[in-house]
Amino acid sequence: MQADEFGVRPGEVMADLPETFDAGLHFIGRLRTPWTKRKDCPKNGLQTQEICTVEVDPAYATGLGNVTGCTHLILLYWMEQATRGLLVQQPRHAAGPRGTFSLRSPARPNPIALSVVELLGREGDTLQVRGLDCLDGTPLLDIKPYYASTDSRPEAQVNRAGADQ
């Protein structure tokens, strides 16, 4: 891992993370994408039409029952190469620093990311999807159905200037 690719930028603030963890996780699979370098990844899933593969470990494959009844899924994944503990970040797209919890950046105390993906098909323990934005081999945490009736919030807004500091 190169410091310039995943390191801390000038002006960023790190948390003093505890030595132990509060919870344990089980990766349920891996995400297969065409991207092996951070600079090549799209910033979000809407910026790509690439078809990617969700590989679910055989121990969890039974959980894929009825998944093809969904047109879209929410994938939660672990950005294992991201910098842990950033509280203030200097995004390349912003004029000034931003609090981590106002960003979708994977650099955070717990590098959990999510994407809403279009489900294109299932073949055994794998799903074909469109809309991922992560490196090849990224660990998969969970799969949830996307319900437009409850997950969509058309009135939602983000004030890019930031109302508080």
Image (cartoon, rainbow, N blue to C red):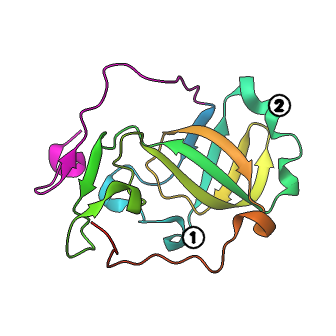
Please state, as top left, top right, bottom left or bottom right, where the N terminus lies in the image: top left
Please state, as top left, top right, bottom left or bottom right, where the C terminus lies in the image: bottom left
Decide: is 97 above or below 29: below
Number of marks:
2
What residue do we see at 63% from left, 31% from top? 28
Q: How far from the left and from the top, in percent, is residue 7?
A: 19, 46
Q: CA distance from mark 1 to mark 2?
A: 28 Å
Side of 32 relative to 86 (left or right):
right
- Give, as a single range, the part of the protein colored magenta: 1-27
Q: How far from the left and from the top, in percent, is residue 71?
A: 79, 63
Amino acid type of the residue that numbered disc 2 sits on in the rendered structure:
Thr
Give the number of the disc on residue 62: 2
Q: How far from the left and from the top, in percent, is residue 52?
A: 59, 54
Side of 22 relative to 141 (left or right):
left
Side of 57 relative to 139 (left or right):
right
Q: At numbered mark 1, what does the secondary structure look like: helix, strand or loop?
A: loop
Q: Residues within 10 Å of mark 1 (few under 14, many from 20)?
A: few
